[in-house]
Image: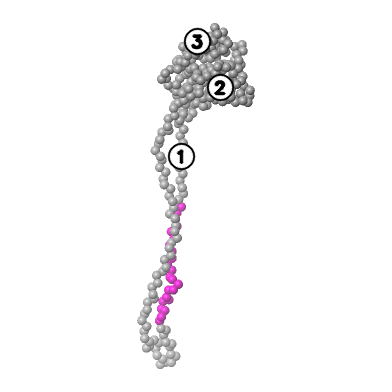
Amino acid sequence: MRFDPERHRRRSMRLKGYDYSQAGAYFVTICTQGRACLFGEVVDGEMRLNDAGRMVVAEWERLPALFPNVVLDAFVVMPNHIHGIVILTDPADDATDGATAIGATISGATTGGAATGGATTRVAPTTAGDDATPVGAGLVPALSTMARDDAIPVGAGIVPVPSVPAPSTPAQSVPAPSVPVPSTPAQSVPAPSTPAPSVPAPTLGDVIGAFKSRVTVEYTRGVKTLGWTPFDKRLWQRNYYEHIIRNEEALNRIRRYIVENPIRWAFDRENPFAVEIESEETWLR
């Protein structure tokens, strides 16, 4: 039975109201637009990747570097689609690996102190002015003494000159040089602790969207510079298929389905030349 897009359209099992950012394991299928076979070919049950297919593998393996809460499990690139298991972990668990939890980057501030120098106080000396009057100025000089015996005693008959005090001349005030007051740095008061804004954990859609976008950019570059097969308008189908893996048994069953996908390529619903379509439902229960 040949593939009928209407009859065999893969049914999305995305749950309404389900939080696709929470920890869990998800089986994901992403198909090229129009099911164009661009990533290689299956030969004798083995997938042989071309350069574009190897680029797809590299971009898939880069996802944990872009999203710290992503762990990758089984994965395969087929000619026109990929299958993979994406495990989203709780971001808080990343701290156990020494990794920084999402949104928890804290910037620290370093407070330095400034050296304070001592100030020297200078006192201006008190000096007399240039026009100060000498002490004793204005006195009448005494008469010269007589050499004879009857000489008038020294100082006799001299009218005493009243004592004239020297005028008081205030010393000129010389202002002290201005000495700046040393600046004392204010003590640093730590700002109140403010919790870092919480950043929502990436959803499964964020992870798949980043993967599809990066592969499209690289494939477009390959078309322009390496001669890769051009695609029509878009590389990937607009949506993607996912299935929530509920338990260990289902996880191991889906792992086997992914690994064996090349062997069953002749029956793969994404194979445009499939002669019979194999149901996936038994693998996903």
CA separation in Å, label 3 and label 2: 25 Å
Q: Residue at x 58, y 23 (%)?
A: 219
Magenta region: 117-139
Vertical comparison of 100 with 155: above or below? above
Residue 11 inside the magenta-drawn segment: no
Answer yes or no: is residue 74 visible: no
The residue that disc 2 covers is 233
Q: Determine which quarter of the picture holds residue 48.
A: top right
- Residue mark closest to the camera, 1 vs 3: 3
Badge 1: how crowded within 10 Å, few (<14), some, or many (20+)?
Answer: few
The residue that disc 3 covers is 7
Answer yes or no: is residue 193 visible: yes
- Which is the main secondary structure of the residues drawn in magenta? loop
Mark 2: amino acid: Lys
Q: Secondary structure under badge 2?
A: loop
The residue that disc 1 covers is 109
Report x, y in % for residue 101.
46, 29
- Residue mark closest to the camera, 3 vs 2: 2
Report x, y in % for residue 80.
56, 16
Could you tell which of marks 1 and 2 lies nearer the N-terminus?
Answer: 1
